[in-house]
Image (cartoon, rainbow, N blue to C red):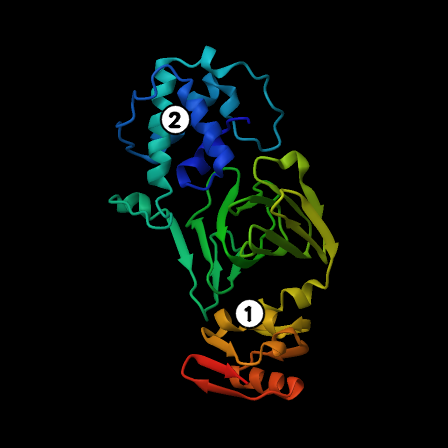
Amino acid sequence: MKITKELLERHSLGLTNKEENEAVEEWFNKLDDPSIGKKAPIETEENKRQIWTKLEQAVPELESHSGRSDPKVIPLYKRVTRYVAAAIILCMVGFSTYYFSISGWNTNEPQIADLYQTVQTQRGEKRTLTLSDGSTIRMNYETEVRAPKQFEGDERIVYLEGHAHFDVKKNPDKPFIIYTEDTKTRVLGTSFDINSKGADETEIIVTSGKVAFSKKEQEANSVTLTVNERAVLKSDNTIATSEVDALKRTAWKDNRLVFEGQTLREIIEVLEPWYAIQVTVQNPALLEEDFILSLDNPPLKSVLEDLSFAGGFEYSIQGTEVIIF
């Protein structure tokens, strides 16, 4: 696996998988003396940029790939000096501080913290986030987005955990990149929906424009998607594509509930976090019944009324608990 600046940044963020972690650790073990510089402080963002510039000059393998051709790889352990080893670890410490906003992480340097933002939604909550370039992110329930308050450099990078719809402002000179735990999506300007909530699967649906979707660190195997196309990175690391009705599949962003042939079991999986409720079904046979339903900005009672009429069941609401019988 190629060790890049991008990979080291994500490793410092805790966003790498097991395979990537092992590759980075093996890479560090090849350095002359990884302990050198480990406790050195990072003073300013300019210092970090200078360090990366020196690293890229001394070790071309660390260049981030933004359309540039890959340099010829020379075994790193034959070329890295003690000075570069110290700089690398110094830089890693710096990026861990700069990207302060990882779940459960804190920083005592407010001047650095002010550069980054983390936005979260809870059960029953949706939220719209506008970024510094004018792009908007509509976040579904139980979702987290991490992004710079001001985009700098030649890329606009955002990190997503959960489910969100992106409307990206077009900028050919500065691609917009979204990382989830396992995937990378690269666009110039378009609209699309990413859902990383599925069990070991990440889904993307394009509502306008064109996107490139791939497993992280495997951009050569990316798939290109256009309007009404869907791709899923499956648990076996393969990508499956299909055609969908994107407007219906992303109706949630407009606070619309649309079900077309889903079972009551599947519908409940949406309703519980949507309304922050707990549903109990006393008749298990009802769970496999199929329903067709489309409602705009519906209160919970309206949804239950329509479902109960179509399914021939009754229900009661007791606080945040719904009982279907």
Residue 36, quarter of the rendered image: top left
- Earlier in the chain: of badge 1 and badge 2, it is 2
Q: Which amino acid lies under the numbered mark 1 shown in the image of this protein? A: Val
For the residues carrying marks 1 and 2, which lies nearer the camera in this image?
1
Rendered position, 262 above or below 204: below
Please tell me which residue is depicted at 55% across the width and 44% down the height of the picture.
Answer: 182
Gap between marks 1 and 2, in whole Å?
A: 48 Å
Left or right: 210, with 202 as reference point: right
Which residue is most to the right?
Answer: 243
Between 174 and 16, the one nearer to me in the picture: 16
Residue 173, quarter of the rendered image: top right
Rendered position, 248 above or below 47: below
Q: Which amino acid lies under the numbered mark 2 shown in the image of this protein? A: Gln
Q: Is residue 6 visible?
A: no
- Which element carries disc 1, helix, strand or loop? helix
- Give coordinates of residue 186: x percent, y percent: 60, 44
Left or right: 292, with 5 as reference point: right
Which residue is most to the top?
Answer: 78
Q: Quadrant of the N terminus?
A: top right
Label 2 packing within 10 angstroms: few (<14), some (14-19), many (20+): few
Q: Tell me whether circle 1 and circle 2 mark residues in contact (CB < 8 Å).
A: no
Label 1 packing within 10 angstroms: few (<14), some (14-19), many (20+): some
Please tell me which residue is depicted at 37% across the width and 14% down the height of the picture.
Answer: 32
Q: Is residue 171 visible?
A: yes
Between 17 and 8, the one nearer to me in the picture: 17
- Give coordinates of residue 84: x percent, y percent: 38, 18
Q: Which residue is mark 1?
A: 270
Q: Which residue is mark 2?
A: 50
Rendered position, 125 above or below 316: above
Q: Quadrant of the C terminus?
A: bottom right
